[in-house]
């Protein structure tokens, strides 16, 4: 099991919105976010539940700045800083959903873990109902190809 993970804003945002963020401390001992991710999640446009968590973070969530950041990756600041932080600390996994960011993370030797995978892992452990959480996720602005959901369901049925 991976003990520490770095996160971009999107997985945290959606897990909070569907009331499933509680699976993170069960999967990881600590979730690190860089300042740019904290800023995204603290935006005045952020949903109230997201603002509440960022303003009063749980013990497993920590803001940590990377030492050096390569802003030439063509990603937003949150993704860029998250990749830099994970690489700098030698943390293998990074919570990230955006395709372009995931590609850059892989090129840096990181393993991107998306929101859907987090839900699948939590369901595999019996902590949540996968279908119920995916249903709530679909009620948000989250976008995922239906085939990925189907494949996750099939993997869960096979276990």
Image (cartoon, rainbow, N blue to C red):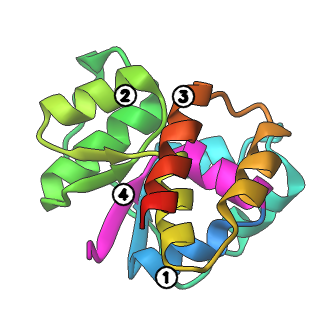
Query: What residue did someone put label 4 on?
Result: 6
Q: Counting residues from the N terminus, which is met first, the one under dot 1 or under dot 3?
A: 1
Which residue carries the number 2 mark?
A: 101
Can you identify the residue that label 1 sits on? 26
Image x and y of residue 19, in percent: 77, 65
Q: Nearer the viewer, residue 146 or 65?
A: 146
**Magenta segment: does it hold 10?**
yes
* Res. 143 image quadrant: top right
The C terminus lies in quadrant: bottom left
Mark 2 secondary-structure assignment: helix
**Residue mark closest to the camera, 1 vs 3:** 3
The residues bearing labels 3 and 2 have C-alpha atoms spaced at a distance of 21 Å
Residue beneath disc 3: 147
Write the residue at 25% across / 35% down. Answer: 105
Circle 3 — which element? Answer: helix
Task: Decide: is 123 above or below 130.
Answer: below
Is residue 9 one of those drawn in magenta?
Answer: yes
Query: Looking at the picture, how far across and down is residue 59, in whole percent?
Result: 54, 85
Q: Which residues are magenta?
A: 1-18
Alpha carbon separation for disc pair 4 and 2? 13 Å
Earlier in the chain: of badge 2 and badge 1, it is 1
What is the C-alpha distance between the residues marked 1 and 4? 15 Å
Q: CA distance from mark 3 to mark 4?
A: 26 Å
Q: Residue at x 26, y 72 (%)?
A: 2
**Residue 70 occupies which quadrant of the picture?**
top left
The residue under the point 79% across, 43% down is: 46
């Amino acid at each position: 099991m991976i003990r520490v993970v770095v996160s971009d804003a999107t997985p945290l945002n959606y897990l909070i919105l569907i009331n499933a963020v509680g699976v993170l401390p069960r999967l990881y001992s600590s979730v690190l976010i860089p300042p740019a991710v904290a800023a995204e999640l603290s935006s005045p446009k952020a949903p109230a539940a997201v603002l509440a968590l960022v303003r009063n973070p749980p013990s497993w969530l920590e803001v940590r700045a990377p030492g050096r950041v390569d802003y030439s990756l063509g990603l937003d600041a949150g993704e860029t800083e998250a990749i830099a932080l994970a690489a700098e600390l030698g943390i293998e996994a990074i919570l990230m959903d955006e395709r372009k960011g995931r590609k850059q993370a892989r090129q840096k030797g990181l393993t991107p873990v998306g929101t859907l995978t987090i839900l699948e892992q939590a369901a595999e452990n019996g902590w949540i109902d996968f279908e119920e959480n995916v249903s709530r996720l679909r009620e948000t602005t989250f976008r995922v190809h239906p085939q990925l959901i189907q494949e996750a369901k099939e993997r869960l049925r096979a276990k």
